Image (cartoon, rainbow, N blue to C red):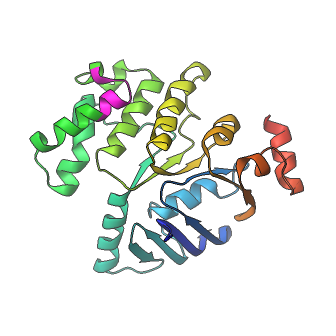
Amino acid sequence: MQPIVQVENLHKRFGGLEVLKGVNLRVAPREVVCLIGRSGSGKSTLLRCINFLEEPDEGRVTVAGISVPAGERTREHRQQIIELRQRAGMVFQSFNLFPHKTVIENLIEAPVVVKGMQPSQVIPLAEQLLAKVGLAEKRDVYPSKLSGGQQQRVAIARALTMQPQVMLFDEPTSALDPELIGEVLAVMRDLARDGMTMIVVTHEIGFAREVADRAIFMDGGVFVEEGPPEQCLSNPRDERTRRFLERIL
């Protein structure tokens, strides 16, 4: 089966610091991959390079048939990135909702601006997605009136309005109070059950054990260990993985 996401020999440097050191990753359609590791290991940078929020220095990223090499500065390259991002939705640690727009306005913004769709075309899908994340009644509310968990669920619904083929989650629960984490993870579990391809940077080891098809432990900009969660997270072979899990469990 052809991978829906393929990362080839990806390098990323910030000044003299090499944060990604030749990363290779293949993700199959409908697969859920969880990236774990300590802060600074390169997890979030890898995610941001997959949709070119950070421009890699070397390598190539392919998402749903759109293949983008690193390091080019052409008009064609910029257009490739736009097309790639339409296929890869992203949810961040902070919710990044527009505070001056209502929930429904937040959801329809990208399809209207990026795809040139009419609001009347997008609103039915946006309302359906709000119902999916349990927030249909918050349609006309402003973000300031929502809890953190509700804002993150709106952010997930907003990403889904672009009808992506892959969802990227960068520690989506790290900014939430403990009692709100469960409601966001529940939405992500539903997405996984529905067959959404997902790459998730997370410290929620219980979620990774339950939902992931594959867990990857990163350290120092490389993959140290990867495999099924029952192996990688419950019986790791590498000492670095064991030490990390002992600290957080």
Of residues 152 and 54, which is closer to you in this image? 152
Name the residue rendered at 62%, 51% in the picture: 213
> Does residue 234 lie above or below 70 as drawn?
above
Most prominent secondary structure in the magenta stretch? helix
Tell me, yes or no, whether the highlighted magenta stretch contains residue 208: no
Region in magenta? 129-136
> Does residue 33 lie above or below 127 as drawn?
below
Q: Is residue 14 visible?
A: no
Q: Is residue 95 visible?
A: yes
Compared across the picture, whether 55 is left or right of 138 comes to right
Q: Quadrant of residue 176?
A: top right
Of residues 248 and 133, which is closer to you in this image? 133
Residue 246, horizontal then vertical, whole percent: 86, 40
Compared across the picture, whether 68 is left or right of 163 comes to right
Furthest-right residue in this view:
239
Tell me, yes or no, whether the highlighted magenta stretch contains residue 131: yes
Total marks shown come to: 0
> Does residue 80 lie above or below 239 as drawn?
below
Name the residue rendered at 56%, 34% in the picture: 173
Q: Quadrant of residue 95?
A: top left
Residue 167, horizontal then vertical, whole percent: 45, 51
Furthest-front residue in this view:
1
Residue 169, horizontal then vertical, whole percent: 51, 46
> Does residue 229 lie above or below 42 as drawn?
above
Of residues 199 and 49, which is closer to you in this image? 199
Residue 212, horizontal then vertical, whole percent: 62, 47
Q: Quadrant of residue 59?
A: bottom right
Quadrant containing the C terminus is top right
Name the residue rendered at 65%, 58% in the picture: 42
